[in-house]
Structures are given as structure tokens and as C-alpha cells.
Amino acid sequence: MKAAVVYYSRSGITKKIAEKIQAKFHADMIFVEPEKKYGSFPSAIIRVIREKKGKKAPAAKTPAADFSGYDTVFIGFPVWAATVPDFLQEYLRRADLAGKRVIPFATAGNNGREESLAALKALLPDSEITDYFYTSMTEKADADAWLEGIRA
Ligand SMILES: Cc1cc2nc3c(=O)[nH]c(=O)nc-3n(C[C@H](O)[C@H](O)[C@H](O)COP(=O)(O)O)c2cc1C
């Protein structure tokens, strides 16, 4: 497998899983940065609520990578407002992942499992989305066991 890990993590929980993937599959890491950093938990919440109400969706400042050399792309994110963070969705709209195996992994407080997967399917209709991993505070899943099950 030639893999990349496209991910965002504000407080480090998703990042830990990204690093496990990197270690296991020697994957290249692509951290997707929002145009403007999200700060503390309360300020991030307030901003995301405001963004959801506003007309202009937030964007990522990370340029889309050239994915032609990869067969597998992991996509990791914290669930925000029950789905994939909007700026990461903006990045994924610019990324050419057609024909790739896409393996999403999400971390959350307590919801957004199905909504996040549905958002990714809509964003990446030409990718093969498989092996989705979701863990939350209320429904903890084992990332090591998940990684064991992924075909190299
Ligand atoms: C702005 C914001 C919105 C969030 N919205 C949700 C949500 O809708 N549902 C949920 O289960 N968790 C939500 N969370 C919690 C995060 O998904 C969770 O803490 C995640 O594991 C953080 O990952 P990270 O450390 O990689 O940033 C939210 C957190 C933030 C900061």
C-alpha cells in the first residue's frame, strides 16, 4: 500500500490515530489547516455555530496535494456539528481522490457517525470508501484492532 493520511485535529485526539496509521503503513502525513486557526474549545464552538449560520463556508488554507502516487488515502477528523468540519470538506472538494481507496476515521463526543460517512460519500462519489472507523466518548472503539483489519 502507498498511503497518505489527510487529517485535521484541534486538540490531538484524531492526531494520535493518524500517527498510528503513519507508523503502521509508513504513510505520508498531510495536515489540513483551516484558513484561520480554531482556538480553545469554547471559542471553536462559538465560531462553528456562527459559520453554520453564515453565508460563506470556511475554507482550508492547505493546497490540495497530488494524490496520483497513492492507492490509499486515510481521512481523519473530529466530528464537528455532527459532521466533517466544513473547511475539511472544502479541501476534499479540491482534492482529486477519484479511484482511490479512502479509509475515513472520525473521533467525536457522542454523535455524527452516520452523518459524517454520508458527507464523505457525497463529497467523494468516485472513491471506494471502506473500513470506516468511528470512536467517541460514549462509544469507544479500538484503533489498534481496526488497523489490524485493514488490508495492506
Ligand atoms: C467546534 C467543535 C464542534 C464539535 N461538535 C461535535 C459534535 O457535533 N458531535 C460530537 O460528537 N462531538 C463534537 N465535538 C467534539 C469533538 O469531535 C471531539 O472532542 C474530537 O474527538 C476532538 O478531536 P481532536 O482532538 O482531534 O480535535 C466538537 C468539538 C468542537 C471543538
Image: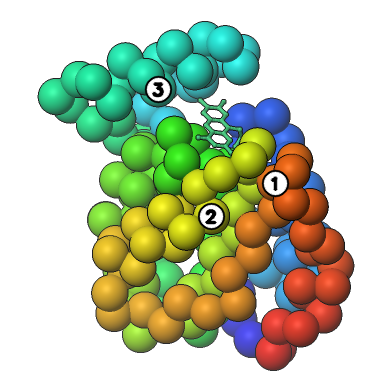
Q: Quadrant of the N terminus?
A: bottom right
Tell me how far mark 1 sits from mark 2, CA to CA. Answer: 9 Å
Q: Quadrant of the C terminus?
A: bottom right
Numbered disc 1: secondary structure: strand
- Mark 1 crowd level (few <14, some 14–19, many ≥20, 10 Å Cα): some
Disc 1 or 3, which lies upstream in sequence?
Answer: 3
| x, y percent for residue 2 | 60, 81
**Could you tell me residue 89's position as x and y percent?**
34, 48
Tell me how far mark 3 sits from mark 2, CA to CA. 18 Å
Residue located farthest toward the bottom when viewing the structure as drawn: 151
Classify 10 Å Cα crowding around label 2: few (below 14), some (14-19), many (20 and above): many
Mark 3 neighbour class, 10 Å CA radius: few under 14, some 14 to 19, many 20 or more? some
Q: Are marks 1 and 3 in contact (CB under 8 Å)?
A: no
Q: Is residue 107 left or right of residue 54?
A: right
Q: Residue at x 35, y 39 (%)?
A: 86
Per the image, the residue denoted by label 3 is 48
Q: CA distance from mark 1 to mark 3?
A: 19 Å
The disc labelled 2 sits on which kind of residue? Arg
Q: Residue at x 53, y 60 (%)?
A: 75
For label 2, the residue is 113
Q: Mark 1–mark 2 contact, CB under 8 Å?
A: yes
Is tag 3's residue or tag 2's residue first in the polypeptide sequence? 3
Q: Earlier in the sequence, mark 1 or mark 2?
A: 2
The residue pinned by badge 1 equals 136
Mark 1 C-beta closer than 8 Å to ligand 1 = yes
Tell me: is circle 3 under 8 Å from ligand 1.
yes
| 86 relative position to 105: left or right | left
Find residue 135 and report its horizontal and vertical position in percent: 70, 53
Residue 138 percent coordinates (x, y): 74, 43
Q: Give SS at disc 2.
A: helix
